[in-house]
């Protein structure tokens, strides 16, 4: 698959992950890069940002094969095979594969097949199920000739996220300026390395199996999972705690990222604002957020007709500039030509 897969991941929730994916998807599309957004969080918050409730209810109630990732992979739990995804065209160069609350039911199948994939025989089914998300991503990218796939997942270290990360080329880690995000970072880094190593063992096991020659067209993801950096929420605008308290945690991120995620020796007192691994500091944008949600569009696409006047209009332009810079930085690190 030539389209790189970028997953936004942190096992600590409330760090603005879904909003980041949503805004970057729109920004890449505005830069004429064809994007497929895949919602693999069973809570489906990203889907709710793109689609109104009536549309989501219709998709979920119809249960048509291919309309969500769950409907694409569900046949594998019985006697069927993967279904080609039906993408929602949100705008020029922007496509969505909606999320599904029923996806959590697929966790058991993924958990059961993980140990089976290290057996001596009957490996095709376990490897087909464990790589099913990647297989569907390939279909989606091929269907629309996508330049990039953006993936949103839930805040946990479960079997669903493990299979998503196996399918992932690049990982971006959104962080808050608090103890909990820092602790999440310490858990996330070793987990990524462990999943990568365990998947490599499964790839090696498949390559030496007698079944491989029977499935010449069956390809598997490499499980690259390369971290390209982190994003930090701006802490200076928070009103419920002093800025100094947030700065205490934010300035510890560079060392923790190097130590636990990159497995490198921490740098000597490098500040977060000077850290090359910090992709951006994300502003809160305050009242622009509910305004954008009401009109179901990204902050930087708000107009005066939407109520973005005066200082709001200036903030809209700032958001456009900031997200464009972030998209350009991510494109550079993932090999996407703008």
Image (spheres, grey):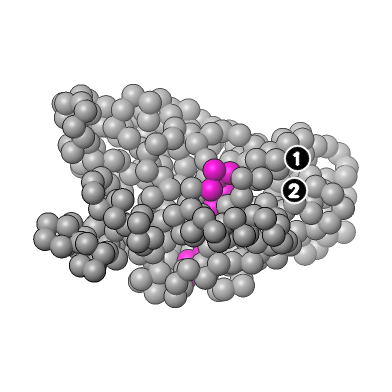
Query: x, y (%) of residue 334?
Result: 43, 58
The picture quadrant where one finds residue 284 is: top left
Q: Earlier in the sequence, mark 1 or mark 2?
A: 1
Q: Position of residue 169 (x, y in %)?
A: 53, 53
Q: Is residue 278 above or below residue 337?
A: above
Disc 2 element: helix
Numbered circle sitting on residue 129: 2
The reply to whether residue 37 is visible in this rendering is: no
Residue 40 in view, yes or no? yes
- At 49% from the left and 60% from the top, the residue drawn is 51
Labels 1 & 2 near each other (Cβ < 8 A): yes
Q: Which residues are magenta?
A: 34-44
Q: Is 305 drawn above or below residue 7 in the view shown? A: below
Residue tagged by mark 1? 109
Q: Is residue 35 magenta?
A: yes
Distance in Å between CA atoms under marks 1 and 2: 8 Å
Q: Residue 238 location, x and y as percent?
A: 21, 34
Looking at this view, is 201 or 96 the one in front? 96
Seen as rendered, the residue at the extreme front is 54
The quarter of the picture where the C terminus appears is bottom left
Identity of the residue drawn at 51% across and 30% down: 190
Q: Residues within 10 Å of mark 1 (few under 14, many from 20)?
A: some
């Amino acid at each position: 698959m030539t389209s790189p897969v970028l997953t936004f991941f942190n096992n600590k929730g409330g760090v603005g992950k879904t909003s980041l994916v949503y805004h970057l998807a729109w920004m890449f599309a505005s830069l004429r890069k064809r994007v497929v957004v895949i919602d693999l969080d069973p809570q489906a918050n990203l889907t709710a940002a793109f689609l109104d409730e009536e549309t989501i209810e219709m998709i979920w109630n119809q249960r048509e094969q291919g309309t969500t990732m769950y409907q694409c992979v569900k046949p594998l739990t019985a006697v069927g095979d993967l279904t080609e995804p039906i993408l929602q065209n949100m705008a020029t160069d922007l496509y969505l594969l909606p999320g599904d609350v029923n996806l959590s039911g697929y966790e058991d199948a993924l958990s059961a097949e993980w140990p089976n994939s290290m057996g001596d025989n009957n490996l095709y089914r376990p490897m087909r199920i464990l790589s099913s998300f990647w297989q569907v991503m390939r279909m989606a990218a091929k269907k629309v000739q996508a330049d990039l796939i953006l993936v949103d997942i839930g805040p946990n270290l479960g079997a669903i996220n493990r299979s998503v990360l196996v399918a992932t080329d690049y990982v971006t880690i959104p962080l808050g300026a608090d103890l909990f995000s820092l602790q999440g970072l310490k858990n996330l880094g070793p987990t990524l390395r462990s999943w990568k190593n365990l998947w490599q063992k499964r790839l090696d096991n498949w390559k030496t199996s007698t079944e491989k020659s029977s499935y010449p067209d069956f390809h598997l993801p490499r499980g690259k999972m390369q971290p390209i950096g982190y994003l930090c929420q701006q802490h200076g605008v928070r009103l419920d705690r002093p800025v100094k308290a947030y700065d205490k945690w934010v300035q510890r991120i560079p060392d923790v990222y190097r130590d636990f995620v990159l497995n490198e020796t921490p740098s000597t007192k490098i500040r977060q604002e000077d850290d090359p691994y910090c992709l951006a500091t994300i502003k809160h944008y305050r009242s622009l957020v509910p305004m954008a949600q009401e009109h179901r569009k990204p902050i930087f696409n708000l107009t005066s007709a939407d109520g973005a006047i005066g200082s709001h209009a200036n903030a809209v332009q700032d958001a456009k500039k900031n997200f464009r810079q972030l998209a350009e930085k991510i494109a550079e690190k993932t090999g996407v030509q703008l």
